[in-house]
Amino acid sequence: MQAFRHGHAAHPSWRTAADLLIARLGPGGAQAQGLGIVYVTERLAERLGDIATLLRERFPRVDWIGASAHGVCAAGVEYTGEAALAAMICELPAGSWRVFGGSHGDGLGGGAPAAGDVARDFGGAGREPGGDFTALVHAEPTTPDLAAAVSELAAQVDTGFLFGGLVGGSQPGSAQLAGQLVRATLTGASFGAPVRLLSRVTQGCAPLAREHVISQCSSQYIQRLDGQPALDVLLEDLGVAAEVRESRDGDEILRALPAERLSNGLMVGLAPASRDRGIGFVDYTVRNVLGIDPQNRLLAIAATPQPGDRAVFCTRDRRAARADLIRICTELREELEAESLRVLGAHYVSCVARGEHLFGAPGAELGIVSHNLGEVPLVGFFANGEIARDRIYGYTGVLTLFVAPRDSGPA
């Protein structure tokens, strides 16, 4: 199998940008066949249908999926705030993928189906046993009960593993491509056994101290950790002096917090007690700590915890983000070497709060991926929520590699 065709372009004129992209996808378009993935920035969202038409004309044997997003990325580069697009053609074995989500309604004029309906239909008619091992998912962020729908969709694939993210930009209602232009809740493509994928999640976090067990909680509050008042445990993890830790004065407690250490916020990583422990924060869903109650010694968080959940307080900064991104690239590189695999192409979804905001310069995040994995074909987008396994994450990066044995043909 050949390395995937890929390209990216930016230009104020949508037609010029599309023509540049098509040229960079290479000659022989009529012979190319497989699954095409294309992403456009907000500036080109209204032209996604026109762009798709041009792509189908040039590559008539390619099935196209994609969406508009806050920004798009390719190998070593990212685009936000300008008219840009990126695409990759995954030349996969015939019958090893299928597009879903595009058969509901009548293009952009039809009503969007409920996310649960798409999830249930995904595993219905036309699915052969063992046919869907995993799936790339584009999700409309305004969809009601989206988290439940993602979990339901994950249950329909044999591995239980999804990858993707919440598409669209600053305006509600995303333009999505699933064979045709649609406004849908969940679209994408599923992959069968012949398509080998490796994937990792990076959350760019550094733990403040050890892991704890939630022993009492309610709604969005953690009341006790390891049998102790939750606020007391947090203050101890932060190294606050003992005499201040006993204070009921909220202002006094806030003044004692290590401001520099918490300059990018305070978060808590949550994981079910039943989930196997992984490396770093791969098993955790990281959410913000919203506030403290000095009188009742509890914490308010942007999540609904459960008794028995594991919890670890953490911060996110540039150093931690770089280290964790290097970690997942290193793990993937070691797996490639151990199993004599090579990369055909890569897909990356990153949070809109990452990119240059977290890594300090445009393209720095994607540059780390290229530096550690080589100049592999890559396409992706910046999301307001990232999908990995059966969950929606925040502030994360989801890196997925299409791979093949090294002796399966030229790269």
Image (cartoon, helix red, strand yellow):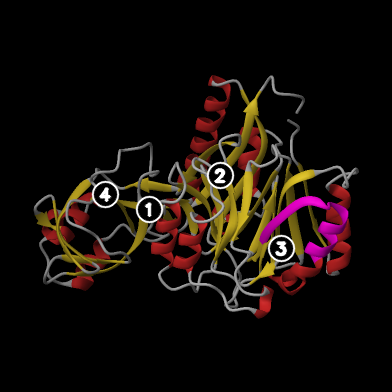
Residue to which mark 1 is pinned: 315
Q: Position of residue 307 (x, y in %)?
A: 17, 56
The CA span between labels 3 and 2 is: 19 Å
Residue type of the residue flagged with mark 2: Leu
Q: Position of residue 407 (x, y in %)?
A: 69, 19
The CA span between labels 1 and 3 is: 32 Å
Q: Are marks 2 and 4 in contact (CB under 8 Å)?
A: no
Q: Are marks 4 and 3 in contact (CB under 8 Å)?
A: no
Residue to which mark 2 is pinned: 399
Mark 4 surroundings within 10 Å by alpha-carbon count, few (fewer than 14), some (14 through 19), many (20 or more):
some
Q: Position of residue 39 (x, y in %)?
A: 69, 59
Residue to which mark 3 is pinned: 40
Residue to which mark 4 is pinned: 272
Residue type of the residue flagged with mark 4: Pro
Residue type of the residue flagged with mark 1: Thr
User: Which quarter of the figure is the N terminus placed in?
Assistant: top right
Residue found at x 70% / y 45%: 75
Tell which of 382 and 172 is nearer to you: 172
Q: Is disc 1 placed on a helix, strand or loop?
A: strand
* Foreground label between 1 and 3: 3
Residue found at x 49% / y 42%: 129
Q: Which residues are magenta?
A: 51-66
Q: Is residue 319 above or below residue 117?
A: above
